[in-house]
Amino acid sequence: MEDLRRLGGEAGVLAGVAMAWLFLGFVVLFPSAGLNLVDQGNPHRYLPFIARHASMFWVVNILGALVAGLLSAVVYMALHDRFKDESPATARIGSFAGTMGAAAFAAAALVRHTGFGWLSTIYATNGVGAAHAFYAVSTVAGSFMGLGNVMAGLGILLFGRVMQRHPRYNSLGYLSMGAGTVMVLAGFVTHPFSFAVSTISAMAWFTRTALALRAEAGPALFRWGTAKSRANGRAQRRVA
């Protein structure tokens, strides 16, 4: 369905923007407000920070992590629709893995948001208990993040194999192999560097994939690049 591919193109752009916002939030906004990447694993620094900057935490976590996770699922479904006729099994498995990864990312964002948000309110009265609970919530959120990286990375790798055999998507296929590999590895390594590299890789992949879908199917909501899409559509109709 061409409409799904168009929506996938728009969702990919927005997912890339959300990931960029998430990355800037953790790497730039939080440190500028007094919380560096290392301290984000310290409950005695992180929970008071959330209590003081609740709106900043909400904006970064919800508009960044949660939105990126939800929108990325649309991209995987659009790719399945695009490649299901050429490689039905690979497209189906890739879509399932990617959608599962997207759901895990969204779950991690919600666990982090609700868990840390609640703990920040009780930290002032029960700091020790809140700190212990912080590590439990961090473990659950980290597990979801790891699962999300592995499954999304596998989905990207599978779609990359299909893309490499298609002239229009050949270069994107190579990018998919690189980004997917990085994301799978990041699922097993909990470190700020792996978070940064996997986020940048996913950001680049979603943006590039969205542009490829838009170039082929046209825009769904935002009309930048419409003239080029219409020209491509007319050329395809003439060939047909």
Image (tube, grey):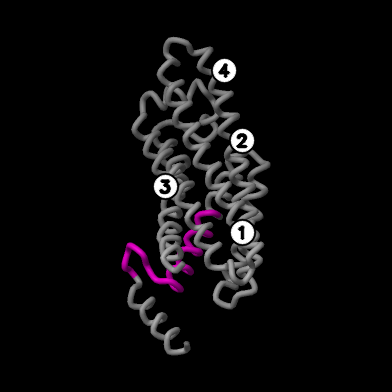
Counting residues from the N terminus, which is met first, the one under dot 4 or under dot 3? 3
What distance separates the C-alpha of mark 3 from that of mark 2?
22 Å
Q: Amino acid at mark 2?
A: Ser
Helix, strand or loop at label 3? It is helix
Give the quarter of the image for residue 6. Answer: bottom left
Q: Residue at x 60, y 52 (%)?
A: 96
Which of the two residues, 183 or 196, is positioned nearer the viewer here?
183
| Residue 179 visible somewhere in the drawing | no
Position of residue 147 in the picture relative to residue 203 (left or right): right
Q: Residue at x 33, y 73 (%)?
A: 226
Give the quarter of the image for residue 138. Answer: top right
**Residue, disc 2:** 143
Counting residues from the N terminus, which is met first, the one under dot 3 or under dot 2? 3
Q: Amino acid at mark 3?
A: Trp
Helix, strand or loop at label 1? It is helix
**Residue, disc 4:** 132
Q: Is residue 153 above or below residue 232?
A: above
**Residue, disc 3:** 21
Give the magenta part as a residue range. 202-224
Q: In the image, is residue 215 part of the stretch drawn in magenta? A: yes
Which of the two residues, 83 or 224, is positioned nearer the viewer here?
83
What distance separates the C-alpha of mark 4 from that of mark 3?
29 Å
